[in-house]
Amino acid sequence: GQNIDQPTEMTATEGAIVQINCTYQTSGFNGLFWYQQHAGEAPTFLSYNVLDGLEEKGRFSSFLSRSKGYSYLLLKELQMKDSASYLCAVRDSNYQLIWGAGTKLIIKP
Amino acid sequence: IAGITQAPTSQILAAGRRMTLRCTQDMRHNAMYWYRQDLGLGLRLIHYSNTAGTTGKGEVPDGYSVSRANTDDFPLTLASAVPSQTSVYFCASSSSGEGHNEQFFGPGTRLTVL
């Protein structure tokens, strides 16, 4: 079967750095996405990785290792507005997204 | 319209009733999707459409139907609602072809079936 694993919840301090991990087992791989979802709102796109390595976009970076079936999202200089759920999704061989359950990130002052 | 819209925002429905959730996008995206999101579970694909005139079944299609008469609209119909269909429903769209083609989401419809 297909499976995406990420921690259910994480807590971090304002101004700090946090890494959210995602491991996956899917039928085929055509890219990995990270989305942010604030409570009661729709998911919004953050990043995309299809090749191994690090993609940096401002305070957010995403890393991919295809051989290990592993990705992480790194958030730097955390702000209170970063409190949200972070969703990992893999595009499989049918070009459909398989979604993890999401990681709820709580930021404390 | 800017982006992707859904209607209604929320709905309480009696079991056995028929309900259509509406979704419209103005980005001229070829592909559209319907997901449901339940607490503790990832987004689950109900139905999708790669282009106008075609539809396909996702992971959890039973009890739902869709149509794609044109590029912009992708309604989701519950023929006879059951309590297990209580969920938040998201419609999404994406371009196809070259590029990473991320999905853009509508604001969601919160449906309660009693």
Image (tube, grey):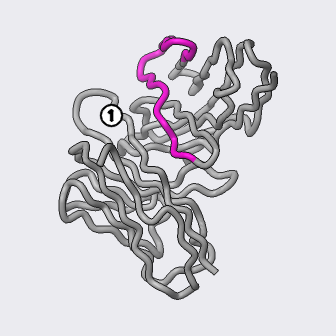
Please state the horizontal and vertical placement of residue A14, each as a whole percent of the image.
Answer: 75, 18
Location of residue A69 by image quarter? top right
Q: Looking at the image, which residue is at 43% across and 33% down?
A: A29
> What kind of residue is marked 1?
Asn
**Is the residue A48 above or below the residue B104 in the image?**
above
Please state the horizontal and vertical placement of residue A55, each as a whole percent of the image.
Answer: 48, 13
Image position of A34 (left or right of B2): right
Identify which residue, A81 or B103, lies in the foreground. A81
**Is the residue A58 above or below the residue A22 in the image?**
above
Q: Looking at the image, which residue is at 60% across and 72% down?
A: B112
Check disc 1: other Cα within 10 Å, few if <14, some if 14-19, many if 20+.
some
Magenta segment, principal secondary structure? Answer: strand
Segment tinted magenta in the rendering? A41-61
For the view shown, which residue lies furthest in the front direction? B1
Badge 1 sits on which subunit?
B
Image position of A12 (left or right of A26): right
Q: Circle 1 is placed at which residue position? A: B101
Q: Looking at the image, which residue is at 46% across and 32% down?
A: A45
Please state the horizontal and vertical placement of residue B93, each as a whole percent of the image.
Answer: 34, 46
**Is the residue B107 above or below the residue B66 in the image?**
above
SS for callout 1: loop
For the view shown, which residue lies furthest in the bottom direction? B16
Identify which residue, A16 or B10, lies in the foreground. B10
* Picture quarter with the C terminus of chain B: bottom right
Q: Is residue A47 magenta?
A: yes
Location of residue A84 by image quarter? top right
Location of residue B61 by image quarter? bottom left
Q: Looking at the image, which residue is at 62% across and 77% down?
A: B83
Please state the horizontal and vertical placement of residue B78, each as a whole percent of the image.
Answer: 44, 76
